[in-house]
Image (cartoon, helix red, strand yellow):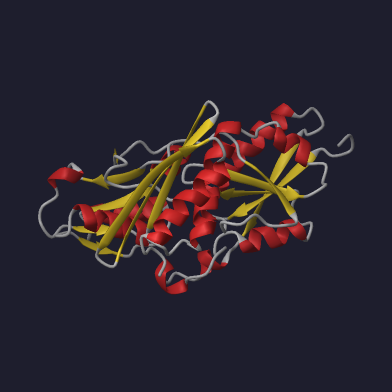
Amino acid sequence: MAHMHTLRVGTRTSSLAVSQATAVARDIVEADPNLTDFEIIGITTKGDVDRSPLSVIGGTGLFTSAVRDALIAGQCDIAVHSAKDLPAADHPALSIFFPPRVSPHDVFCGHVDYRDLPPGATIGSGSPRRAAQLLHFRPDLTVVDVRGNVPTRLARIDHDLDGVILARAGLLRLGIDTGQDLPFDVMVPAAAQGALALETVKGSPFEEPLSRVDDRKTRREVTAERAFMAAMGAGCTTPVGVLGDASGSTVSLHARYVGGGAEVEGRLIADDPIAVATELANEFIDRGVGE
């Protein structure tokens, strides 16, 4: 690292991606005397180009594969992702690190309290998970697909929508203070929501500076959540939410699936993140989820 001065940081080109990559890059550089500056390398992903609904595009890695390819090709030194966008399984060529997580809550943004929405109100969300849980909570609502950056989606509240569902983490990272946190008994978040994932090529000199910002609590929670999704064979179009809580030596896991007119919900606690994830996933599979 003695001869490395500028950290090249690969990320998506959206304002949110650049904002969160800039913040984490600043922390890494400040913690490493061998790094004096950083450069953001903007990378366009398939999910940025194809504006179709996520349920139509399908697949995994829509917002991360191109960034990972650039990292492996040596176009950047590290990659910064929203952890929830990553496939459930780790990449065999990459090391992954998790800085401290911010709020995992989903947020309702509108002009009235979410509990006071009139019958038939139209709510925007591009997430099958959010749509399914919202309609389970209020079957009378209409949910329409919305894509685009955060300001674009918020602007639609003043035009054709009664509200939108967003992630609190994205609002925080953009410095936007709006909306109501939806309680977890209304909406269980996506796996790894609120967490960032930092990747570098295995064996690279950048593993050491990334390890300095790695947070044990976040790692244990996100490991359990991603392992649950992997064991379920679930992806970003699966209407399932899962949230871990690492406390002391244990990890508790809360998951909810809403689909096909049925709801399956479960909670487990164990010492090992992988064990609790596997056991809870098997319980869901035994109850018919994924068939």
Question: In the image, what residue occupies the spot 55% across and 28% down?
Answer: 249
Q: Is residue 11 left or right of residue 228?
A: right
Q: Is residue 35 left or right of residue 166?
A: right
Q: Position of residue 40 (x, y in %)?
A: 66, 48
Q: Is 13 located above or below residue 261 in the figure?
A: above
**Which image quadrant: the N terminus?**
top right
Return the residue nearer the eye: 65 or 265.
265
**Residue 126 in view of the camera:** no
**Which image quadrant: the C terminus?**
bottom left
Question: In the image, what residue occupies the spot 50% across and 36% down?
Answer: 251
Q: Position of residue 150 (x, y in %)?
A: 40, 51
Q: Is 156 located above or below residue 49 in the figure?
A: above
**Residue 114 in view of the camera:** yes
The quadrant holding residue 100 is: top right
Q: Position of residue 55 (x, y in %)?
A: 40, 69
Q: Is 237 located above or below residue 171 in the figure?
A: below
The quadrant holding residue 20 is: top right
Return the residue nearer the eye: 25 or 138.
138
> Residue most toward the left?
119
The quadrant holding residue 159 is: bottom left
> Residue most toward the front?
286
